[in-house]
């Protein structure tokens, strides 16, 4: 198991290095730059732009910039934002809580609702509920998150006035109730796609399990249906979901990016979009590396958990 | 199973209870703050708060460092210049007691010696007195080589700064430069007693917890969300009348409008309300919409060194073939004002009576025929082997400009010109593509003015072409010796009528040469909640939050 974990970690480190090289190259080779936002200002001149570019080290050769960035990164200095003038780690930290809240709530909703729909769908296969759940999941997977978001705002904020049209808090009100009130719509919107994915996987996994001999045996032994389902079927059906959970992180992150923009949620997704727009290289690279690490951790934990529960994985 | 099915089916009662609680918990505090006071006059002491929604996030709080308009909107609340420019274009003393002029002795007749008398009662937010040492420090900091200053235009001419008294400062200009009055009107003073202690002026803690002499002092910032400022009760000028000022960042303009509509924000700033929402917004109860002209002139920027566009006859024909009225009325909901000049029509230097654009495709065709541009294969004109074909670029995602391009393609096809669209994201198009004149033509809005000053040397001076090693932003690559002469002359004149004549001549030349194809002076539609008083659009400031010190709830 230790060797398996070590191999996975080495692979992850190589992958991170590749991500950093590719990300840095794409970002810096893309046309435009962080100073283009000033190009229409009557108060600045080309000379000013050249001077500022030099002061920021942007006129150095790209490999030099990369090695300098990499060295600093490995030393724990993730650089300073061109826009904010704040350390990148501090900026990421200040947006992390908001994204975590949103993603955690959405995941919780998705797991509970998705599993419930999936299990019920599997037990009542081809019933009206199952058909509706299947159609609903297809719709949720097909329609873009931003559309769901705009519809939710229109219905619940503009027309009904039940929920705020966005933001994480009412300014000056830091209460939990206020946070929850603001969290409902974006979390549900973000959870929609996730719920559909969980429901589909859970249904399939459950169907697979309940067709096994040991379930038939348990039923034949006269065990109550709820016990067969919860003790025998559910535990085994949940195993493959570990992988689903591990691999869902990137999808969730992508969804959060959209939901945060539509609901003006001050999280990492919006920070990432803003930073790309401004070509704030240090922040974009910081978020890229942070996300890559998170995805790899998710994947690593899923691998480890799966290997722990299924020895064939680590042996093979 | 029967029990668990309830999870997905909350009953009607629980929904109603929840929504009532939600409405009570969230909607009340905002409106309570907003409508805290009901008075016809400003309150005796600061009261209530305003949530100003911005579509860009303010991130630069050191007012001398590189920032954009949205940052300047915050600087106006935190800092003060020596004087500012009011909506009518007058210089109004702020930290200075009077605006220096030749008449009051503040300026020598040759414009080289400046004497500025300062207000004795101004204080920094931490209680320290503002003095001439702060002015000297600010001007010196701008010229400090390793300081990442926004620009040194005008400032680099300042020499021999002398603090004569705590409330008086003198300096000498290396050469006479009249636009410096306007430049100083947009230069905010920074505190010596704080910044002199910084080891690196670029990374001082001040940059994220600024201390100024403005009507509001720094409160807190939640990055990516909002900035909160509190009233500076020892402010030296009128106001502030609000207890708190919140800059709320909402990047999407549709979402921003929705939050204004649902009452979550009190004012929509910077890009304001999208033209397609203006009519609806005007009908909203408890809201009003103020449409004001901005100094930004929307135009087609031709690259004057590019093939067919170098021919003045082609530019004239293209200009004549634009259905400008359709562009303004149909695509921009009739909000902007057609213009022929780079100077806003409200400015003192605006030259009226410039030749007026007329939509005349027949005349445009005749003009091109006469200039030797004959129709070739597919109806596209050509001359000497050069086809009348070019690209047009603008910021991708700007729906109105993209629609304008479609209209232009049609208009120009009718006179035998082919235009192809080549749009790019903002960070790309305004980079090297624009700065090094790599475009054929671009649709862009530019504020050519330095505050209220029409000195456009960086835009139209022949020494300002970056693609030819120049130092300005003459990306059009415009060169005209007479224009150069007028630009030099105007920058050395201090008498406004003389300057008006100089820049009037310049506007005639630029219009005659069609160095730019002017479309319209842009309009800004800003939403304000009923009862919010003091809002006053100012075409000479970079943000209509310039006088937020005078805002209050009635």
Image: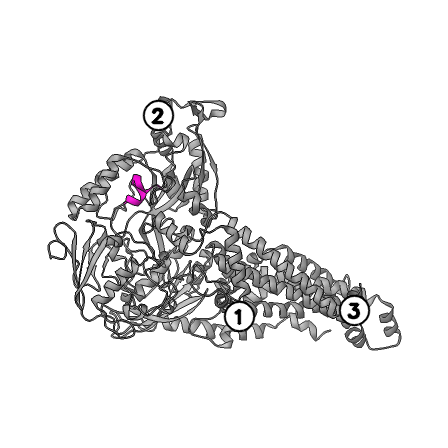
Q: Secondary structure at mark 3?
A: loop
Q: Quadrant of residue B263?
A: bottom left
Question: Which sits earlier in the primary sequence, circle 3 or circle 1?
Answer: 1
Is the residue under label 2 in contact with that under label 3 (CB below 8 Å)? Answer: no
Q: Which region shows up in magenta? A: B456-465
Residue at the disc numbered 2: B367
Going by the image, does A60 lie left or right of B177? right
Residue B454's place in the image compared with B188, above or below, is above
Q: Residues within 10 Å of mark 2 (few under 14, many from 20)?
A: some
Whether residue B473 is visible here, answered yes or no, is yes
Tags 2 and 1 on a common chain: no
User: How much space separates mark 3 and mark 2, taking CA atoms?
Assistant: 82 Å
Q: Secondary structure at mark 2?
A: helix
Which image quadrant: the C terminus of chain B?
A: bottom left
Q: As rendered, which of B219 and A142 lies closer to the eye?
A: B219
Q: As rendered, which of B129 and A136 lies closer to the eye?
A: B129
Residue B209's place in the image compared with B374, above or below, is below
User: How much space separates mark 3 and mark 1, taking CA atoms?
Assistant: 34 Å
Front position among marks 2 and 1? 1
Residue at the disc numbered 3: A310
Q: Residues within 10 Å of mark 3 (few under 14, many from 20)?
A: few
Residue B463's place in the image compared with B19, above or below, is above
Which subunit holds the residue at mark 1?
A
Residue drawn at 58 percent across, 59 percent down: A254
Going by the image, does B267 lie left or right of B180? right
Residue at the disc numbered 1: A97
Which image quadrant: the N terminus of chain B?
A: bottom right
Which subunit holds the residue at mark 3?
A
Q: As rendered, which of A85 and B231 lies closer to the eye?
A: A85
Which subunit holds the residue at mark 2?
B
**x, y (%) of residue A187?**
57, 67
């Amino acid at each position: 198991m230790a060797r398996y974990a070590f191999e996975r970690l080495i692979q992850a480190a190589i992958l991170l290095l590749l991500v950093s090289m590719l990300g840095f190259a794409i970002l810096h080779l893309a046309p435009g730059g962080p100073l283009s936002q000033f190009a229409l200002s009557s108060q600045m001149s080309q000379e000013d732009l050249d001077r500022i570019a030099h002061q920021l080290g942007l006129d150095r050769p790209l490999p030099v910039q990369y090695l300098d960035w990499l060295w600093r990164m490995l030393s724990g200095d993730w650089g300073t934002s061109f826009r904010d003038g704040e350390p990148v780690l501090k900026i990421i930290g200040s947006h992390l809580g908001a994204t975590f809240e949103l993603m955690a709530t959405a995941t919780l909703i998705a797991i509970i609702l998705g599993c419930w729909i999936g299990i019920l769908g599997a037990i009542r296969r081809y019933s009206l509920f199952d058909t509706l759940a299947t159609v609903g999941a297809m719709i949720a997977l097909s329609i873009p998150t931003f559309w769901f978001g705009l519809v939710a705002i229109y219905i619940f904020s503009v027309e009904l006035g039940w929920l705020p049209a966005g933001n994480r808090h009412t300014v000056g009100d830091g209460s939990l109730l206020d946070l929850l009130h603001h969290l409902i719509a974006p979390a549900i919107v973000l959870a929609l796609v996730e719920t559909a994915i969980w429901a589909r996987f859970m249904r399939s996994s459950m169907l697979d399990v309940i067709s096994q001999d040991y379930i038939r045996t348990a039923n034949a032994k006269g065990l109550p249906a709820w016990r067969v389902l919860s003790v025998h079927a559910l535990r085994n059906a949940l195993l493959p979901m570990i992988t689903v959970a591990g691999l869902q992180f990137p999808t969730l992150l992508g969804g959060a990016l959209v939901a945060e923009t539509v609901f003006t949620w001050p999280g990492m997704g919006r920070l990432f979009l803003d930073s790309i727009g401004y070509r704030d290289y240090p922040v974009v690279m910081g978020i890229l590396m942070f996300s890559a690490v998170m995805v790899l951790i998710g994947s690593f934990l899923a691998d480890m958990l799966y290997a722990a529960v299924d020895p064939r994985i680590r042996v093979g | 199973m029967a029990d668990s099915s309830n999870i997905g089916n909350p009953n009607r009662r629980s929904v109603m209870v929840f929504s009532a609680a939600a409405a009570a918990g969230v909607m009340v505090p905002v409106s309570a703050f907003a409508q805290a006071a009901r008075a016809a006059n400003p309150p005796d002491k600061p009261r209530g708060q305003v949530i100003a929604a911005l579509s860009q996030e303010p991130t630069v709080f050191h007012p001398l460092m590189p920032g954009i308009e949205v940052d300047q909107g915050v600087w106006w609340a935190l800092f003060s210049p020596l004087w500012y420019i009011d909506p009518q274009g007058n210089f109004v003393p702020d930290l200075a007691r009077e605006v220096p002029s030749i008449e009051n002795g503040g300026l020598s007749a040759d414009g080289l010696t400046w004497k500025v008398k300062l207000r004795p009662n101004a204080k920094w937010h931490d209680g320290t007195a503002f003095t001439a040492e702060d002015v000297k420090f600010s001007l010196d900091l701008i010229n400090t080589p390793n300081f990442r200053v926004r620009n040194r235009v005008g400032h680099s001419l300042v020499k021999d700064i002398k603090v004569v008294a705590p409330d008086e400062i003198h300096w000498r200009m290396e050469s006479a430069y009249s636009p410096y009055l306007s430049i100083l009107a947009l230069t905010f003073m920074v505190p010596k007693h704080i910044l002199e202690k910084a080891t690196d002026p670029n990374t001082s803690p001040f940059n994220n917890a600024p201390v100024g002499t403005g009507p509001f002092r720094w409160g807190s910032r939640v990055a990516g969300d909002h900035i909160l400022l509190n009233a500076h009760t020892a402010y030296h000028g009128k106001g502030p009348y609000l207890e708190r000022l919140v800059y709320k960042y909402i990047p999407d303009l549709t979402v921003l409008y929705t939050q204004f509509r649902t009452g979550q924000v009190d004012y929509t700033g910077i890009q304001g309300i999208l033209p397609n929402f203006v009519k609806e917004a005007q009908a909203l109860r408890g809201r009003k919409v103020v449409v004001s002209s901005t100094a930004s002139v929307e135009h087609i920027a031709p690259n004057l060194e590019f093939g067919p566009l170098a021919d003045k006859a082609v530019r004239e024909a293209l200009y004549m073939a634009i259905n400008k009225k359709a562009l303004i009325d149909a695509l921009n909901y009739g909000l902007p004002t057609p213009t022929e000049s780079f100077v806003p029509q409200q400015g003192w230097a605006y030259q009226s009576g410039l030749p007026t654009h007329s939509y005349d495709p027949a005349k445009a065709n005749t003009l091109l025929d006469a200039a030797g541009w004959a129709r070739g294969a597919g109806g596209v004109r050509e001359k000497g082997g050069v086809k009348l074909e070019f690209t047009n670029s603008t910021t991708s995602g700007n729906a109105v400009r993209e629609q304008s391009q479609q209209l232009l393609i049609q208009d120009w096809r009718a006179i035998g010109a082919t235009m192809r669209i080549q749009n790019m994201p903002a960070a790309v198009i305004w980079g090297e593509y624009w700065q090094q004149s790599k475009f054929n033509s671009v649709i862009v809005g530019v504020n050519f003015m330095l505050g209220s000053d029409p000195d456009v040397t960086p835009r139209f001076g022949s020494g300002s072409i970056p693609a030819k090693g120049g130092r300005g932003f003459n990306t059009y690559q415009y060169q005209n010796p007479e224009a150069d002469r007028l630009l030099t002359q105007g920058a050395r004149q201090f008498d406004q009528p003389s300057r008006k004549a100089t820049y009037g001549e310049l506007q005639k030349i630029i219009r005659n040469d069609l160095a730019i194809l002017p479309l319209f002076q842009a309009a800004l539609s800003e939403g304000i909640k009923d009862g919010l008083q003091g809002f006053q659009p100012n075409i000479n400031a970079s943000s209509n939050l310039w006088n937020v010190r005078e805002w209050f709830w009635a």
